Amino acid sequence: MSPALVGIDLQAVFADPASAWAAPRYPDAVAGVRRLLPAFAGRIVLTRFVAPARPQGAWVPYYEQWPDQLRPEDDPIWDLTDGLGAIDAPVVTATTFGKWGEPLRRALGDADAIVLTGVSTDCCVLSTALAAADAGMPVAVVADACAGASDEDHRRALDAMALYAPLITVTTVEQVLRARSTGAERG
Protein backbone atom coordinates (compact mmCIF):
# COMPACT_ATOMS: atom_id res chain seq x y z
CA MET A 1 0.00 0.00 0.00
CA SER A 2 0.99 3.58 -0.51
CA PRO A 3 -0.68 5.58 2.30
CA ALA A 4 -0.68 9.31 2.89
CA LEU A 5 -0.67 11.10 6.23
CA VAL A 6 -3.62 13.48 6.69
CA GLY A 7 -3.43 16.09 9.45
CA ILE A 8 -6.99 17.16 10.22
CA ASP A 9 -7.55 20.76 11.35
CA LEU A 10 -4.37 21.41 13.35
CA GLN A 11 -5.39 25.04 13.83
CA ALA A 12 -5.22 27.84 16.36
CA VAL A 13 -8.94 27.66 17.14
CA PHE A 14 -8.41 24.14 18.54
CA ALA A 15 -4.98 24.82 20.08
CA ASP A 16 -5.75 27.98 22.08
CA PRO A 17 -6.89 27.02 25.60
CA ALA A 18 -9.02 30.18 25.67
CA SER A 19 -10.99 29.06 22.62
CA ALA A 20 -14.44 27.56 23.11
CA TRP A 21 -13.35 24.84 20.69
CA ALA A 22 -10.03 24.01 22.38
CA ALA A 23 -8.95 20.37 22.44
CA PRO A 24 -7.19 19.98 25.82
CA ARG A 25 -4.66 17.43 24.53
CA TYR A 26 -3.90 19.35 21.34
CA PRO A 27 -0.16 19.62 22.16
CA ASP A 28 0.02 15.82 22.52
CA ALA A 29 -1.68 15.33 19.15
CA VAL A 30 0.73 17.75 17.44
CA ALA A 31 3.69 15.96 19.05
CA GLY A 32 2.42 12.68 17.55
CA VAL A 33 1.96 14.29 14.14
CA ARG A 34 5.46 15.74 14.26
CA ARG A 35 6.89 12.26 14.94
CA LEU A 36 5.04 10.91 11.88
CA LEU A 37 5.95 13.66 9.40
CA PRO A 38 9.41 12.35 8.40
CA ALA A 39 8.00 8.88 7.66
CA PHE A 40 5.49 10.40 5.21
CA ALA A 41 7.67 13.02 3.51
CA GLY A 42 6.05 13.94 0.19
CA ARG A 43 2.85 12.11 1.16
CA ILE A 44 1.25 14.58 3.57
CA VAL A 45 -2.01 16.53 3.27
CA LEU A 46 -3.26 19.02 5.83
CA THR A 47 -6.81 20.29 6.25
CA ARG A 48 -8.39 23.41 7.69
CA PHE A 49 -11.89 23.97 8.95
CA VAL A 50 -13.28 27.47 8.33
CA ALA A 51 -16.65 28.99 9.02
CA PRO A 52 -18.89 29.56 6.01
CA ALA A 53 -19.45 33.14 4.89
CA ARG A 54 -23.19 32.53 5.25
CA PRO A 55 -24.31 29.48 7.20
CA GLN A 56 -27.15 27.54 5.61
CA GLY A 57 -29.43 24.73 6.70
CA ALA A 58 -28.45 23.04 9.95
CA TRP A 59 -25.39 25.29 10.15
CA VAL A 60 -27.60 28.30 10.97
CA PRO A 61 -28.58 27.09 14.48
CA TYR A 62 -25.08 25.66 14.93
CA TYR A 63 -23.48 29.07 14.51
CA GLU A 64 -26.18 30.64 16.65
CA GLN A 65 -24.59 28.57 19.43
CA TRP A 66 -21.05 29.55 18.36
CA PRO A 67 -21.33 33.13 17.01
CA ASP A 68 -17.77 33.97 18.12
CA GLN A 69 -16.45 31.38 15.63
CA LEU A 70 -18.25 32.88 12.64
CA ARG A 71 -15.15 34.61 11.26
CA PRO A 72 -13.73 35.10 7.77
CA GLU A 73 -11.48 32.44 6.27
CA ASP A 74 -8.36 34.61 6.71
CA ASP A 75 -8.90 35.15 10.45
CA PRO A 76 -5.86 33.94 12.46
CA ILE A 77 -8.02 31.46 14.41
CA TRP A 78 -8.06 29.30 11.27
CA ASP A 79 -4.25 29.30 10.88
CA LEU A 80 -2.35 26.03 11.09
CA THR A 81 -0.19 25.92 14.22
CA ASP A 82 3.25 24.75 15.26
CA GLY A 83 4.84 25.60 11.92
CA LEU A 84 2.66 23.09 10.05
CA GLY A 85 1.57 25.74 7.57
CA ALA A 86 5.20 26.02 6.46
CA ILE A 87 5.69 22.38 5.50
CA ASP A 88 5.53 21.41 1.85
CA ALA A 89 2.07 19.82 1.76
CA PRO A 90 -1.24 20.61 0.12
CA VAL A 91 -3.84 22.19 2.39
CA VAL A 92 -7.52 21.39 1.87
CA THR A 93 -9.90 23.97 3.35
CA ALA A 94 -13.57 23.17 3.97
CA THR A 95 -16.56 24.56 5.83
CA THR A 96 -17.62 21.05 6.85
CA PHE A 97 -16.51 18.80 9.69
CA GLY A 98 -15.78 15.89 7.39
CA LYS A 99 -12.97 16.61 4.95
CA TRP A 100 -13.46 13.57 2.73
CA GLY A 101 -14.49 14.66 -0.75
CA GLU A 102 -13.06 15.44 -4.15
CA PRO A 103 -10.63 18.18 -2.99
CA LEU A 104 -9.01 15.85 -0.43
CA ARG A 105 -9.07 12.93 -2.84
CA ARG A 106 -7.25 15.02 -5.47
CA ALA A 107 -4.70 16.24 -2.90
CA LEU A 108 -3.94 12.63 -1.95
CA GLY A 109 -2.77 11.84 -5.47
CA ASP A 110 -2.10 8.13 -5.86
CA ALA A 111 -2.46 7.29 -2.15
CA ASP A 112 -4.42 4.11 -1.69
CA ALA A 113 -4.89 4.46 2.09
CA ILE A 114 -4.93 7.30 4.61
CA VAL A 115 -3.42 7.66 8.06
CA LEU A 116 -5.53 10.20 9.96
CA THR A 117 -4.29 12.47 12.72
CA GLY A 118 -5.57 15.74 14.19
CA VAL A 119 -8.57 17.23 15.92
CA SER A 120 -11.11 16.81 17.03
CA THR A 121 -11.26 13.04 17.25
CA ASP A 122 -14.97 13.20 18.08
CA CYS A 123 -15.87 15.60 15.27
CA CYS A 124 -13.73 16.28 12.21
CA VAL A 125 -11.53 13.17 12.45
CA LEU A 126 -14.56 10.92 12.99
CA SER A 127 -16.54 12.57 10.17
CA THR A 128 -13.61 12.24 7.77
CA ALA A 129 -12.80 8.65 8.72
CA LEU A 130 -16.36 7.39 8.29
CA ALA A 131 -16.89 9.07 4.93
CA ALA A 132 -13.51 7.91 3.57
CA ALA A 133 -14.10 4.33 4.71
CA ASP A 134 -17.59 4.40 3.25
CA ALA A 135 -16.05 5.44 -0.07
CA GLY A 136 -13.72 2.43 0.10
CA MET A 137 -10.54 4.16 1.25
CA PRO A 138 -8.65 2.16 3.91
CA VAL A 139 -8.26 4.38 7.00
CA ALA A 140 -5.89 4.16 9.97
CA VAL A 141 -6.65 6.57 12.82
CA VAL A 142 -3.61 7.32 14.99
CA ALA A 143 -5.07 7.53 18.49
CA ASP A 144 -2.10 9.30 20.11
CA ALA A 145 -1.82 11.82 17.25
CA CYS A 146 -5.44 12.91 17.71
CA ALA A 147 -7.18 14.92 20.41
CA GLY A 148 -10.83 15.22 21.32
CA ALA A 149 -12.97 17.83 23.01
CA SER A 150 -12.31 15.79 26.17
CA ASP A 151 -10.54 12.54 26.99
CA GLU A 152 -13.91 10.81 27.26
CA ASP A 153 -15.08 12.13 23.88
CA HIS A 154 -11.75 11.11 22.31
CA ARG A 155 -12.11 7.56 23.66
CA ARG A 156 -15.74 7.23 22.59
CA ALA A 157 -14.90 8.36 19.05
CA LEU A 158 -12.01 5.89 18.82
CA ASP A 159 -14.28 3.12 20.09
CA ALA A 160 -16.93 4.02 17.49
CA MET A 161 -14.37 4.03 14.66
CA ALA A 162 -12.96 0.68 15.82
CA LEU A 163 -16.39 -0.80 15.15
CA TYR A 164 -15.74 -0.22 11.42
CA ALA A 165 -12.80 -2.64 11.27
CA PRO A 166 -11.33 -3.63 8.91
CA LEU A 167 -12.35 -0.50 6.96
CA ILE A 168 -10.95 1.64 9.80
CA THR A 169 -8.17 0.61 12.14
CA VAL A 170 -7.18 2.45 15.29
CA THR A 171 -3.44 2.49 15.78
CA THR A 172 -0.62 4.39 17.53
CA VAL A 173 2.34 6.48 16.40
CA GLU A 174 4.72 3.65 17.34
CA GLN A 175 2.73 1.07 15.38
CA VAL A 176 2.63 3.30 12.28
CA LEU A 177 6.36 4.04 12.46
CA ARG A 178 7.15 0.36 12.95
CA ALA A 179 4.96 -0.59 9.97
CA ARG A 180 6.58 2.09 7.79
CA SER A 181 10.08 0.85 8.68
CA THR A 182 9.21 -2.79 7.98
CA GLY A 183 7.15 -2.14 4.85
CA ALA A 184 3.83 -3.22 6.37
CA GLU A 185 2.34 0.05 5.13
CA ARG A 186 -1.20 0.35 6.46
CA GLY A 187 -0.41 1.38 10.00
Image (cartoon, grey):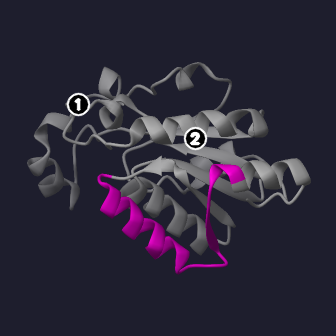
Part of the protein shown in magenta: 149-174
User: Is residue 159 placed above or below 41 in the rendered structure?
Assistant: below
Q: Which mark is residue 5?
A: none
Say what amino acid the circle numbered 2 marks.
Gly
Disc 1 marks a residue whose amino acid type is Arg
Q: How many marks?
A: 2
For disc 2, the neighbor class at 10 Å (few under 14, some 14 to 19, many from 20) is: many
Task: Residue at 33% x, 21% y: name it.
Answer: 76
- Check if residue 165 falls in the magenta segment: yes
N-term mark: 1 or 2: 2
Q: Position of residue 97 (x, y in %)?
A: 38, 53
Q: Residue at x 79, y 52 (%)?
A: 178
Q: Which residue is mark 1?
A: 71
Q: Quadrant of residue 169?
A: bottom right
Looking at the rendered structure, the secondary structure element under dot 2 is helix
Give left or right: position of 156 versus 186: left
Report helix, strand or loop for mark 1: loop
